[in-house]
Amino acid sequence: MRYNIGQNVTLTEGYRGYKSGEIVGYEFPLYEVELSSGKVIKVYEDEIES
């Protein structure tokens, strides 16, 4: 599945207690996800779901 910038997603495995975030960028093959704390993490497509 292809995700769009601005789309809300859920991490399949939480990151330090955070499970949801927003797509803010894409650099093949990684998506950049901003968590509610403001931290941006890079994840593979199979690590997120809508």
Image (tube, rainbow, N blue to C red):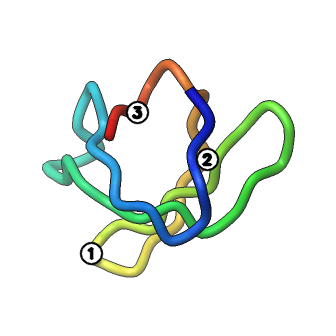
The x and y percentages for residue 19 are 19, 47
Question: Mark 1 belongs to which amino acid?
Answer: Ser
Q: Which residue is mark 3?
A: 48
- For label 3, the SS is strand
Q: Is residue 30 left or right of residue 47?
A: right
Mark 2 and mark 1 lie on one chain; the one further toward the N terminus is 1
Determine whether 33 is above or below 40 in the image: above
Which quadrant is home to the C terminus?
top left
Q: Which residue is mark 1?
A: 36
Question: Mark 3 belongs to which amino acid?
Answer: Ile
The x and y percentages for residue 26 are 75, 53
- For label 1, the SS is loop
Mark 3 and mark 2 lie on one chain; the one further toward the N terminus is 2
Q: Residues within 10 Å of mark 1 (few under 14, many from 20)?
A: few
Q: Residues within 10 Å of mark 3 (few under 14, many from 20)?
A: many
Q: Nearer the viewer, mark 3 or mark 2?
A: 3
**Residue visible at 60% across and 56% down in the picture:** 4
Which quadrant is home to the N terminus?
top right
Res 8 quadrant in image: bottom left
Q: Are marks 3 and 2 in contact (CB under 8 Å)?
A: no
**C-alpha distance separating marks 1 and 3:** 15 Å
Q: Are marks 2 and 1 in contact (CB under 8 Å)?
A: no
Residue placed furthest toward the right = 28
**Residue visible at 57% across and 37% down in the picture:** 43
The number of numbered discs placed on residues in the rendered structure image is 3
**Residue visible at 61% across and 47% down in the picture:** 42
Q: Are marks 1 and 3 in contact (CB under 8 Å)?
A: no
Q: Is residue 13 left or right of residue 35?
A: left
Q: Nearer the viewer, residue 10 or 1?
A: 1
Res 48 quadrant in image: top left
Determine whether 22 is above or below 41 in the image: below
Q: Which residue is mark 2?
A: 42
